[in-house]
Amino acid sequence: MSQQPVAFLTRRETFSACHRLHSPHLSDAENLEVFGKCNNLNGHGHNYTVEISVRGPIDQRTGMVLNITELKDAIEEVIMKNLDHKNLDKDVEYFAKTPSTTENLAVYIWNNIRLQLKKPELLYEVKIHETPKNIISYRGPYALNGIYNPINKRIAHDSCTNISSDSD
């Protein structure tokens, strides 16, 4: 029995948006300490590059994992219409109570791209280049012992473990 080939398909798009790194869960002093100059009251902007990747078997009839037009349309709806040339904190309801970090932006894009796809299980990764040096990758909710943690946070183990590493 031969295995069906599996491929990754990635579409890249760029968009511009501004935001202020500020958490409603922190005091003004804590926000300034944590986010520094990115906590500027007037915010700052980025020219983001986002890569949306799907992974799945290559359909024997079409020769595709997913019709690229479906992915292009999903990106247009989720990113270009809702995020491009927007103030993330003021124009996107999701960020009214959620800090507009690039990590949270990746979660927002992931959740909303999934809603646009006929087969959301094919979504593999959202990768955002905030700057040439700062890149965030998100591959869905964090699994702990095979169970998804809905708040998407790592949980410290009883032993001394660096919870910020990928080794846990």
Image: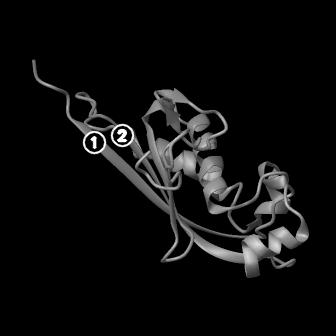
Which quadrant does the C terminus fall into? top left
Distance from the alpha carbon under mark 1 to that under mark 2: 6 Å
Percent of width and height locating residue 58: 26, 34
Contact? badges 1 and 2 (CB < 8 Å): yes
Around disc 2, counting alpha carbons within 10 Å, would you say few (fewer than 14), some (14 to 19), or many (20 or more)? Answer: some
| Residue located beneath label 1 in the image | 7
Number of numbered discs visible in the structure rendering: 2
Nearer the N terminus, badge 1 or badge 2? 1
Seen from the viewer's position, the closer of residues 96 and 64 is 96
Percent of width and height locating residue 81: 69, 55
Seen from the viewer's position, the closer of residues 57 and 94 is 94
Tell me the quarter of the picture where residue 95 sits: bottom right
Around disc 1, counting alpha carbons within 10 Å, would you say few (fewer than 14), some (14 to 19), or many (20 or more)? Answer: some
Residue 77: tell me if it is visible: no
| Residue located beneath label 2 in the image | 55
Percent of width and height locating residue 156: 57, 43
Left or right: residue 15 compared with residue 24: left
Left or right: residue 151 compared with residue 59: right
